[in-house]
Image: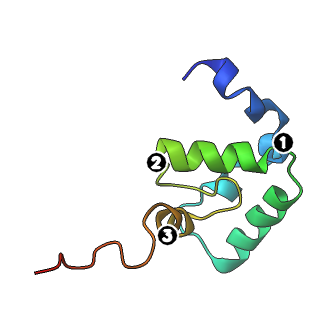
Amino acid sequence: MPMEEIGWLRRGACRSSDPDLFFPLAPTPLQEARAKAVCARCQVIEECRTYALDAGESEGIWGGLTPEERRRTRLPAGWRRPAAS
């Protein structure tokens, strides 16, 4: 992806954080809360979230969302309902 499309990364609140906070081997509720607290004060949270959703990021916390939260955003409840007969 061209840098001009992700230039917002340089302005992210996470740029000075340990990447393991956002990409842990075994996520815990405390770790997720700490990562989301960084995201909550970020000036580019919307760009980050949009990037993660558009790119289909399957790992890590992006834009304040966990992988499961991003899946729910992309695939709303009921999306796999059986076809009408």
Residue 40 seen in render: yes
Q: Which residue is mark 1?
A: 16
55 sits left or right of 33 in the view: left
11 sits left or right of 74 in the view: right
4 lies above or below 47: above
72 lies above or below 45: below
Gap in Å between the C-alphas at discs 1 and 2?
A: 24 Å
Mark 3 or 2, nearer chain start = 2
Under tag 1, what secondary structure? helix
85 sits left or right of 35 in the view: left
Mark 3 or 1, nearer chain start = 1
Residue at image x 65%, y 51%? 49
Residue at image x 27%, y 79%? 81
Of circles 3 and 1, the one toward us is: 3
Q: Are marks 1 and 2 in contact (CB under 8 Å)?
A: no
Quarter containing the N terminus: top right
Q: Which residue is mark 3?
A: 72
Of circles 1 and 2, the one toward us is: 2
Nearer to me, 36 or 28: 36
26 sits left or right of 38 in the view: left
Q: Amino acid at mark 3?
A: Arg
Gap in Å between the C-alphas at discs 3 and 2?
A: 12 Å
Mark 1 or 2, nearer chain start = 1
Q: Amino acid at mark 1?
A: Ser
Q: Which residue is mark 2?
A: 56
Residue at image x 71%, y 42%? 47
Image quarter for residue 6?
A: top right
Residue 18 seen in render: no
